[in-house]
Image (spheres, helix red, strand yellow):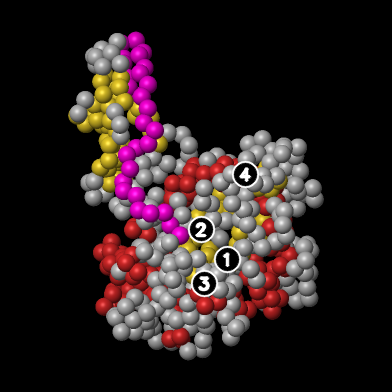
């Protein structure tokens, strides 16, 4: 049995590798031919510490589910995704009618608690995520640098969005929802400023119902655990299973979001990752490894750069005309782009908004994307990924990722500091620093240099907390010494910190 299973896995890997490699040489057709493209048992990956097995393709809540063209039925897209076995579903409180469209589909699928024929097991077998773009659960109006948004009523706060999601997908759409309705996860949507980071954490350490301001995380913890520490969950409801966040702009900010999470509240992260990632301040060598080190479930988005890899302008979508309704292009097949995101280490699933479905497989984005997503995490070699990057880098001169911060090179270790310790006859320089940021190549190590000579090094590891890295250098004299720290990447490129001095004694 074990041998047969191993052979099957090897055969599948070879098939996927062959398909991807073939794609690099195909320039005249926008799809990869896979016979009927039927996927009987979609691949799944364990979604971090949630333990849930998610399909490698998830359904995004935008495209035709939000910006619906007049001749498209968004409910049919959701129903087809479910029929094909997709089990991860994404939406948000700023996606217009998206949640209502899911609600219509869930009624057809008998997934609404309290209604006749409710299929509880079917509901348990999907992972449903919504988002809130409201940073405060209480107060916080007009705080500088804090952007909040919702399609709900003016004055809404974080838990209003949670209840709105439940009402629109499982209730009457007017604020009511049935007992037993829940969301598998709520993401704090699109963190973009450091003030927003402070806002969502406000009140988490010392929740006080009388506080003027309470951030989103403290309130989400209450409705996850069935507590009322904030005073905002008086019925002590348990409305969500997991908490996470999303971002597509600043990798450093997203890293800090994870590092500040000393209670390990964050089980999931939705992150932009596509083949033009390295042309920007990239996610794959910065925040994604941090999330992976914390065993978070990680969802890829912007696989096609929000459609900018194809027919859509490199700008925010806001109308049906922006929905991409074709499969790939003659010069850039869609399969390699899907596989690039899904073979980025740390990624578990990729949400892709579907603009068009069809009974004709060649024209059906959903069928094509699901077939493309049948890829093992390590199926593409480094050279395969580089070929895909070269294909994508020429699209719009590489300026597809309008939502992502501009490129940053490898940085030096940050906030380098030195303390001198003398214990008896032993004199030590205790160096501390915060993580460096990677450029296009992953970080490899930190080097410690004293007076122009290398005296030590530490292998790179993702920084998962706010606690700095520490290195102790024993000095055998009483003279002054100058230290610098270097970050070194896998290609041998380095960046040096400013010098710090150890005083003579």
Would you say residue 298 is visible in this rendering? no
Q: Which residue is the extreme one toward the bottom?
A: 360
In the rendered structure, which segment of residues is drawn in magenta?
Answer: 403-430
Q: Earlier in the sequence, mark 2 or mark 1?
A: 1
Q: Nearer the viewer, mark 3 or mark 1?
A: 3
For label 2, the residue is 270
Residue that mark 3 sits on: 353
Q: Nearer the viewer, mark 4 or mark 1?
A: 4
Q: Earlier in the sequence, mark 2 or mark 4?
A: 4
Count of numbered marks: 4
- CB atoms at circles 2 and 4 under 8 Å apart? no
Residue 111 occupies quadrant:
bottom right
Q: Between 20 and 131, which is closer to the camera in this rendering?
A: 131
Q: Is residue 388 above or below residue 326?
A: above
**Percent x, y of residue 280:** 37, 56
Coordinates of residue 331 in the picture (x, y in percent): 32, 78
Q: Which percent across, then down, holds residue 369?
A: 45, 75
The relative height of residue 45 versus residue 232 in the rendered view (above or below) is below
- Residue nearer the viewer, 17 or 491: 491
Dot 1 falls on a residue whose secondary structure is strand
How far is disc 4 from disc 1 in space, using C-alphas? 29 Å
Mark toward the start of the polypeptide (4 vs 1) = 1
Residue matched to label 4: 143
Q: Residues within 10 Å of mark 2 (few under 14, many from 20)?
A: many
Nearest to N terminus: mark 3 or mark 1: 1
Q: CA distance from mark 2 to mark 1?
A: 10 Å
Q: Are marks 3 and 4 in contact (CB under 8 Å)?
A: no
């Amino acid at each position: 049995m074990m041998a047969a299973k191993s052979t099957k896995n090897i055969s599948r890997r070879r098939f996927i590798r062959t398909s991807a490699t073939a794609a690099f040489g195909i320039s005249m057709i926008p799809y990869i031919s896979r016979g009927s493209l039927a996927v009987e048992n979609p691949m799944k990956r364990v979604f971090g510490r949630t333990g849930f097995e998610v399909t490698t393709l998830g359904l995004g809540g935008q495209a035709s589910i939000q910006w619906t063209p007049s001749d498209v039925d968004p409910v049919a897209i959701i129903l087809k995704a479910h029929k094909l076995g997709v089990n991860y579903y994404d939406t948000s409180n700023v996606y217009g009618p998206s949640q209502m469209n899911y609600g219509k589909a869930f009624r057809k699928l008998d997934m609404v608690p309290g209604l006749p024929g409710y299929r509880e097991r079917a509901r348990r077998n999907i992972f449903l995520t919504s988002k809130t773009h409201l940073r405060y659960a209480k107060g916080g109006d007009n705080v500088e640098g804090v952007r909040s948004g919702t399609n709900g009523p003016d004055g809404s706060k974080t838990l209003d969005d949670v209840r709105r999601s439940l009402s629109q997908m499982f209730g009457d759409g007017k604020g009511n929802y049935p007992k037993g309705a829940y969301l598998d996860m709520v993401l704090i949507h699109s963190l973009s400023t450091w003030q927003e980071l402070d806002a969502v954490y406000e009140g988490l350490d010392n929740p006080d119902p009388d506080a003027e301001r309470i951030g989103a995380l403290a309130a989400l913890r209450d409705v996850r655990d069935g507590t009322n520490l904030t005073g905002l969950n008086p019925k002590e409801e348990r409305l969500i299973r997991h908490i996470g966040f999303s971002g597509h702009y600043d990798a450093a900010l997203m890293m800090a979001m994870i590092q500040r999470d000393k209670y390990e509240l964050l089980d999931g992260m939705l992150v932009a990752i596509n083949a033009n990632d390295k042309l920007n301040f990239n996610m794959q060598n910065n925040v994604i490894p941090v999330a992976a080190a914390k065993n978070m479930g990680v969802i890829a988005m912007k696989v096609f750069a929000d459609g900018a890899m194809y027919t859509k302008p490199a700008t925010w979508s806001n109308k049906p005309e922006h929905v991409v309704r074709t499969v790939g292009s003659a010069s850039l097949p869609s399969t390699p782009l899907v596989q690039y995101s899904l073979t980025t280490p740390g990624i578990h699933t990729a949400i892709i908004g579907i603009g068009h479905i069809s009974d004709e497989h060649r024209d059906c984005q959903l069928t094509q994307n699901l077939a493309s997503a049948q890829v093992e995490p390590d199926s593409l070699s480094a050279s395969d990924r580089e070929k895909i990057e070269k294909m994508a880098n020429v699209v719009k001169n590489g300026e597809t990722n309008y939502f992502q911060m501009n490129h940053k090179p490898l940085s030096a270790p940050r906030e380098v500091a030195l303390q001198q310790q003398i214990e008896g006859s032993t004199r030590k320089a205790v160096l501390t620093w915060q993580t460096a940021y990677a450029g296009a190549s992953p970080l490899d190590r930190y080097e410690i240099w004293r007076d122009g000579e290398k005296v030590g090094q530490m292998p790179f590891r993702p920084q998962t907390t706010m606690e700095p890295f520490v290195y102790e250098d024993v000095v055998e004299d009483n003279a002054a010494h100058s230290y610098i720290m270097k970050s070194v990447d896998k290609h041998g490129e380095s960046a040096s910190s400013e010098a710090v001095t150890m005083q003579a004694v």
